[in-house]
Image (cartoon, coloured by chain):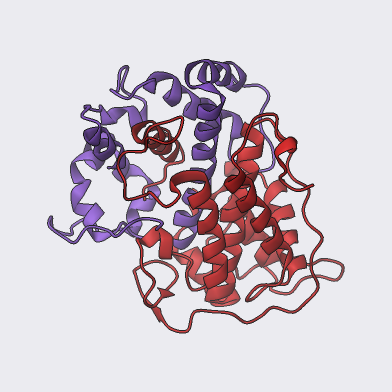
Chain colours: A red, B purple
Amino acid sequence: MGFAAESFDVDVPQHQRAAFDAAWQWLAEPSGCWTGAEKVAMVEVARAAVPRPVWDRRPETIGHLATDAEPGTILSPVVVDTIERIAVEAGAIRREWALSVIAGLGETAYAELAAVIATIVPIDRACQLLGRDLEPLPAPVRGAPTGESADATVDIGAYLPSAEGFFGPNVAKSLSIAPTANLMRLGVVRALYSGDRFGELRWDDGALNRPQVELIAARTSALNECFY
Amino acid sequence: MLLRASSDALGSEVDATAVVGNATDCGVEHGEVLEAYAVAAHDALGPATGAISSESDLGVVTAAVRRTVGDDGWVEAAMTVAVFNGLVRTADASGIPLDDGVVSATADDRDQLGLGDFAGAANSDLTIAAGASPSPGLFN
């Protein structure tokens, strides 16, 4: 059924449901560095993650974690740890830790992993806030990773380099080293937030005007201690 | 910055301290109930992504939002909360700095709102001089 209109108790615009469906399809398919099974498993980990108590804080490096998946598992301990941090403790991520993970996984693999979470979390959150059950995860599509990665990159001062020539502010280009993954998560952002009218300060075609949306956005970001 | 700019475009004056919950009348239409919704949603969702708490006042606040701005407004509010829960993870996971034009344009607001205390502030060089080029369109 996917994100069909009747799966919600309230009218959700078609373009938003279509973005959700597209994200679910992308989640199931192999991408640059990960198989569909690995990406689906990432979301299972993210959904089950809970913040660690203060007496159980994790080290700022990954040297103690295995980089290969154990028999019978899909994801390695270092990948599971990375997913859990981004999913529920992203505000505690520090440069030292991020760089050590990126050195181990690779820049594009890390970017794709982050994009999986950044794409699925808003969809899950939307469902939760609208009183809908979380969508069951898709059956993975067989196939090997495609090897896709940006042809050339530039340093923007972040943990990851960005695709050279990518137009947009840093939050848009942040994961652009993984081109398709970045476009997928930006597709969800556009569908749920600004559409193609970001540069317009007056939004007169929705139920909320632009300041009302921006108030909710800014308050949410402050509550999440999002500096950016 | 966008809250202030979009309010200016409507000819209204906004109290930006609403962003950190310090305004009683921020100047945004129905701002009080929408700000309450953002808080209630945040409290109910919590940090774990797979669950939502039933022990919150989200239901009460949601009902108020629906009465005030209608079901379509509620959906837009929920989608806004949802998408910014993804953007914070993108920003924190990638360590992106503020865009140069934003650094200078938001200096006063950052000071007023205490945003420099957020951990992500360490990723930005906040000494960039005023007058730097503004950012291009965010998601276009």
Percent from the top left, x then y, of residue A21?
68, 53
Nearer-the-camera pick, A166 or B17: A166
Q: Is residue B68 left or right of residue A26?
A: left
Asked if residue A225 is positioned above or below residue B95 in the image, the reply reads above
Q: Which residue is at 69% across, 42% downward?
A: B50
Nearer-the-camera pick, A61 or A124: A124
In the orientation shown, which residue stands out farthest toward the front? A205
* Residue A183 visible from this viewpoint: yes
Q: Which residue is at 58% across, 76% downward?
A: A104
Nearer-the-camera pick, A221 or A19: A19
Nearer-the-camera pick, B116 or B42: B42
Percent from the top left, x then y, of residue A148?
59, 80
Q: Choose top left, top right, bottom left or bottom right for residue A40.
A: bottom right
Q: Which residue is at 58% across, 17% downward?
A: B63
Q: Choose top left, top right, bottom left or bottom right for residue A144.
A: bottom right
Asked if residue B114 is positioned above or below residue B131 in the image, the reply reads above
Asked if residue B91 is positioned above or below residue A48 in the image, the reply reads below
Percent from the top left, x then y, of residue B105?
19, 49
* Residue A61 visible from this viewpoint: no
In the orientation shown, which residue stands out farthest toward the bottom? A151
Percent from the top left, x then y, of residue A58?
59, 55
Q: Is residue B135 left or right of residue B31?
A: left
Q: How many marks?
A: 0
Q: Which residue is at 19% across, 61% downward?
A: B133
